[in-house]
């Protein structure tokens, strides 16, 4: 199955849903490698496995806790000595294997396939026992060997002597100590001595605190015992390594049996995941065939949530090709995806969300052409990309092929598109493929009606509310929904009638209508601005006072009081608020407005310490002196 089909049918989402029902990473890894089988015997066996799993799920399946030990097996194969943790995982896995063997011991009568798999499992209780006797609470047990027992007894003796002598030492030297707590530094037992008294205590300085106030000293009276303890610890480590190496070798001696156990347990996890998934989606076991016959009874798309309208569809008995018509967003594409995904589910050995007595044909190839395949990398248009996909389908299709085509021939000239679509359908039909196609083209609908081995179907919609009903009706084709919907939405009847006539005979009306256009000249009036007018700068939404009226380019100089700046603006972008003659009394000196503004601005600039303002004043004073 190529990536295009996986993407269009959302195959990866189906696999991810299935994986949530596996109990171990073993099963999940196997699900990732699963692929639809084109062989009817393999598919039937897969379905029978799922059926048996469902019958057993009322019991507690002993797969919980059976972990993935694949990485541990790889370590053994590389000659690495396993640590305690890994050996315990091996023991737990082997215990799980024994539980599975015991579980299927009396179930061969009604689950013959699954029970037969348990015969491939090997119980290795002797390895379990060896590991469990040698490792307890995550470390090598003291009774794992006589030598280890001897070493650990001497370790306990030396540690007791050290603790006893340190307690006496603390009692005698208490006045020199920072604390009476015994601490280990660099694997040495030390006493915390005040820095001022470090020479009063006999021993070796091992460490000191960050500030240097505390010196960590190993008293001389325990150094002999500490050295003996270090030596014993080394012996202990070596003996533990020997024991772990011996246990690893025992595991290695039965590695092939363990690897086969891993494969069988993974297979069980996969099969029971399929059973759990079937129960979760209320699925049924379909009947299968290689004759191209599919009959879906109340089927649902497994990935759609909510109130999904069940699908009833039949193909492959009296006709081998089906053309589906209907409104946009009416569910035609969902029908294609549902048929494709239910077929793939069956070939994976999954039950399908449909009623009993549904039939699914098994195919060696499934091709889909759904949705927008536009390729930006190859600079292909949507239509070109569809055609490229269709060319591949035509070359590879045969009688064991299911082809699902969405809106065949769309994306180009309708006449050419319809003609090309019919030619493609003819070619696929000659190859005896099973075809389901959705279309808006009346030509394809009429062709399907006339062809003895084609059938039509329509997606229903509510003629009153114009809402899609997502229900497929086989043997019928939809009316011209575009005209019907247009009429319901208020398009005049004579327009609908004219459109219906154009559909039949293409006798378009080319009568030219003479148009009289009356030209209207619009005169624009502009305010002549005067000094002192209060105005609004429209672009900036700022008020100001006209400093100078229009120049030759019709720009107006406007004084902005907030910042003391004079800016020029085109007169069409200025709105008069109050004219100067209405703002000021007769004989008022309008120039004084701008002088006052400048003085006030200069005062504000000086007050805030503006260097520019100070330089300007200094320049004026210099000019006056000169």
Image (cartoon, rainbow, N blue to C red):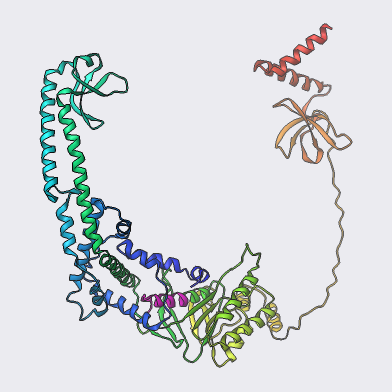
Determine if residue 358 is in view.
no
Above or below — where is 357 with respect to 595? below
Start-end of magenta stretch: 338-355
385 drawn magenta? no
Magenta residues, dominant SS class:
helix
Above or below — where is 619 with respect to 342? above
561 to the left or right of 82? right
Determine if residue 617 is in view.
yes
Q: Where is residue 202 drawn, in percent x and y?
A: 18, 18
Residue displayed at 40% across by 75% down: 345
Residue displayed at 24% across by 80% down: 112
347 drawn magenta? yes
Q: Nearer the viewer, residue 528 or 311?
A: 311
Above or below — where is 552 with respect to 383? above
Q: Nearer the viewer, residue 313 or 376?
A: 376
Q: Where is residue 161 drawn, in percent x and y?
A: 10, 30
Q: Nearer the viewer, residue 314 or 255?
A: 255
Q: Nearer the viewer, residue 284 or 445?
A: 284
Which quadrant, please, contains the C terminus?
top right
Residue displayed at 23% across by 32% down: 187
Give the farthest residue toward the right: 552
547 to the left or right of 93? right
486 to the left or right of 53? right
């Amino acid at each position: 199955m190529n990536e295009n089909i996986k993407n269009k049918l959302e195959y990866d989402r189906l696999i991810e849903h299935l994986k949530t029902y596996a109990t171990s990473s073993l099963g999940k890894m196997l699900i990732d490698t699963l692929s639809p089988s084109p062989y009817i015997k393999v598919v039937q066996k897969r379905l029978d496995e799922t059926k048996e799993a469902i019958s057993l799920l009322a019991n507690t399946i002993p797969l919980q806790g059976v972990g993935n030990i694949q990485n541990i097996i790889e370590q053994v194969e590389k000659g690495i000595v396993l640590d305690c943790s890994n050996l315990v995982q091996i023991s737990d896995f082997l215990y799980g294997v024994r539980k599975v063997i015991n579980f299927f011991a009396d179930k061969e009568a009604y689950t013959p396939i699954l029970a037969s798999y348990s015969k491939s499992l090997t119980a290795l209780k002797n390895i379990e026992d060896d590991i469990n006797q040698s490792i307890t609470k995550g470390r090598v047990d003291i009774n794992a060997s006589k030598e280890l027992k001897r070493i650990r007894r001497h370790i306990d003796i030396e540690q007791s002597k050290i603790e006893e002598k340190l307690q006496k030492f603390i009692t005698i030297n208490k006045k020199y100590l920072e604390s009476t707590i015994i601490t280990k530094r660099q694997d040495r037992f030390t006493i915390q001595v005040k820095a001022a008294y470090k020479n009063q205590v006999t021993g070796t300085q091992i460490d000191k605190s960050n500030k240097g106030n505390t010196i960590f000293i190993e008293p001389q009276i325990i150094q002999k015992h500490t050295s003996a303890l270090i030596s014993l610890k080394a012996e202990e480590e070596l003996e533990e390594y020997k024991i772990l190496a011996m246990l690893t070798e025992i595991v290695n001696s039965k590695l092939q049996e363990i690897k086969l156990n891993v494969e069988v347990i993974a297979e069980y996890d996969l099969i029971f995941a399929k059973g759990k998934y079937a129960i979760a989606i209320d699925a049924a076991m379909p009947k299968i065939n290689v004759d191209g016959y599919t009959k879906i009874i109340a089927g649902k798309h497994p990935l759609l949530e909510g109130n999904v309208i069940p699908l009833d569809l039949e193909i492959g008995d009296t006709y081998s090709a089906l053309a589906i018509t209907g409104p946009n967003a009416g569910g035609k594409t969902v029908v294609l995806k549902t048929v494709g995904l239910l077929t793939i589910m069956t070939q994976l050995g999954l039950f399908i969300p449909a009623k009993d007595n549904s039939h699914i044909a098994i195919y060696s190839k499934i091709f889909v052409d759904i949705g927008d395949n536009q390729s930006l990398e190859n600079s292909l248009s949507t239509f070109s990309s569809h055609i490229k996909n269709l060319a591949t389908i035509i070359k590879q299709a045969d009688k064991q092929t299911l082809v699902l085509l969405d809106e065949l021939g769309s994306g180009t000239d309708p006449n050419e598109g319809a003609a090309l679509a019919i030619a493609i359908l003819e070619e696929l039909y000659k190859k005896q493929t099973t075809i389901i196609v959705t279309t808006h083209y009346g030509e394809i609908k009429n062709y399907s009606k006339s062809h003895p081995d084609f059938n039509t179907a329509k997606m229903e919609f509510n003629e009153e509310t114009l809402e899609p009903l997502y229900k497929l009706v086989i043997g019928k084709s939809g009316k011209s929904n575009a005209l019907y919907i247009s009429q319901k939405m208020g398009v005049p009847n004579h327009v609908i009638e004219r459109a219906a006539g154009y559909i039949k005979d293409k006798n378009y009306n080319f009568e030219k209508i003479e148009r009289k256009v009356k030209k209207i000249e619009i005169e624009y009036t502009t305010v002549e601005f005067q000094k002192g007018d209060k105005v609004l700068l429209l672009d900036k939404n700022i008020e100001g006072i006209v400093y100078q009226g229009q120049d030759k380019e019709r720009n107006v100089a406007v004084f902005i009081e907030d910042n003391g700046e004079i800016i020029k603006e085109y007169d069409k972008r200025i709105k008069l608020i109050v004219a100067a003659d209405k703002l000021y009394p007769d004989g008022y000196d309008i120039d004084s407005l701008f002088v006052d503004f400048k003085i006030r601005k200069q005062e504000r600039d000086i007050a805030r310490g503006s260097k520019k303002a100070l330089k300007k004043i200094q320049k004026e004073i210099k000019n006056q002196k000169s």
